[in-house]
Amino acid sequence: MLRHPLVESLLSLRGNVRACVYTEPLWGIPFNLYAPYVSVYMRELGLIDTQIGLLITLGWILQIFTALLSGPITDRLGRKRATLIFDLISWSVPTLIWALAQNFYWFLAAALFNSLWRITMTSWNCLLVEDADPQQLVDIYAWVHIAGLLSAFFAPLAGLLINAFSLVPTMRGLYLLAFVLMTIKFIWLNAIVTETKQGRIRMLETKTQSLFSMLSGYRAVFGQVLRTPSTLYTLGIMLVMSICMMINSTFWSLLVTERLLIPPEHIAIYPFAKSSLMLVFFFLVLPRFRELPFRYPMLLGFACFVLSQLLLITIPEKSYLLLLAATFLEACGAASVNPQMDRLTVVTVDPKERARITSLLYVTVIMLASPFGWIAGSLSSINRILPFSLNIILFLIGGLLVFLAARSADRLRQRLAASQ
């Protein structure tokens, strides 16, 4: 009996890859349940646009330091131990704070703890890919995204709960649910993974090194990045996506509720639709992209992103169907770009220095993106559509970077062919 290629790849996963992918819904489902309502929740508790933007910027500034430390900490503690420790600190602790939040200072404290997720992002990604088959990377990252999209089947429940109990009590309950499910996930994952081969090597190499001496090694790593055009283009694409996703996740619900006048209890329709459409895309369209060069799906994705933002800022009030169309285009863009971008961050990085190069990429992205939380907040306070106008410009830049990255890859292949 023939199986779908994605199903076949899921069933063929083994070891750490299997553990990371199979447990991911325990993080993805609760996160995606509360995520669409975060900024509205803040507003209900008395925060204004500039405070929300300031929290985003402060969180990203804190992440500069945690991302910088993520490589040395991951190498020193090992991928497995670092993932457990910093998952608990960066997700279990802040979900409790968010559940009990009363004002701006509660959210500030939660941002402090949550900023440490940059460490576990590096360590968890190393756990995921270091012992994996490179040919499976697109499928592996597709399943990571699918795991989060499973929340689509629960998203309408959030809207029903908000309608029945109002926004703030529902959000407090969702955060408590996130605390329980995420904590179970972190402990379970730690029980079933093993330290990677490269992780064991780096633990031995860094056993006698201080964090300061390990940080000093970033100078050589930074030079290596600057000498690798493919990594620089990947960095640029990561930066564009980080800024745009930050803007969308923070200000989309404010635009929808306050400019398009769609009630908060109806917001859940759109994450449900987006997740469902992305699931369909992953299963019906993504397999056709597997053998294509990365440029084609990524250029298609950025074109969809631009069209989605153009539609979002031009539709009239209470236009449910047009907002659904914008959501459809955004879903197609995300499903086209995200797995390819994740793959690029793996294949363009030296595997011997994966932890430090990855953390350096994240640091650079955070440093350059962090002002955009405040910038987008200021733009939103002037006019709700301005942050999404900024997104259009950034998505166009992202498409240009994909084009340049593809041309660079073509030149490299031509040089390699000529030297043989």
Image (spheres, rainbow, N blue to C red):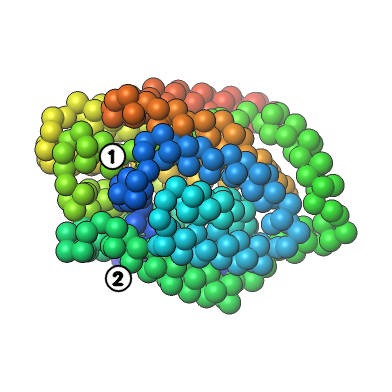
Element assignment for label 2:
loop
Q: Please identify the residue farthest to the right as the structure is shown.
A: 208
Graded by Cα atoms within 10 Å as few (under 14), some (14 to 19) or many (20 or more), the crowding at tag 2 reads: few
Element assignment for label 1:
helix
246 left or right of 347? left
Locate the C terminus and report the quarter of the image it occupies.
top right
Mark number displayed over residue 108 = none
**Where's residue 361, x and y in %?**
62, 39
Residue occupying image coordinates x 29% and y 25%: 383
Which amino acid does the dot numbered 2 rest on? Met
* Residue highlighted by disc 1: 254
Residue occupying image coordinates x 84% and y 53%: 210
Q: Nearer the viewer, residue 104 or 208?
A: 104
As measured in the structure, the alpha-carbon distance from the residue carrying label 1 to the one carrying label 2 is: 48 Å
Which amino acid does the dot numbered 1 rest on? Leu
Disc 1 or 2, which lies upstream in sequence? 2
Locate the N terminus and report the quarter of the image it occupies.
bottom left
* Eye-nearest disc, 1 or 2: 1
Residue occupying image coordinates x 63% and y 65%: 85
**Where's residue 52, x and y in %?**
41, 40
Residue 313: quadrant of the picture? top left
Is residue 237 at all visible to an observer of this figure? Answer: no
Is residue 187 at all visible to an observer of this figure? Answer: yes
Residue occupying image coordinates x 52% and y 75%: 188
Whether label 1 touches label 2, CB < 8 Å: no
Q: How many marks?
A: 2
* Residue highlighted by disc 2: 1
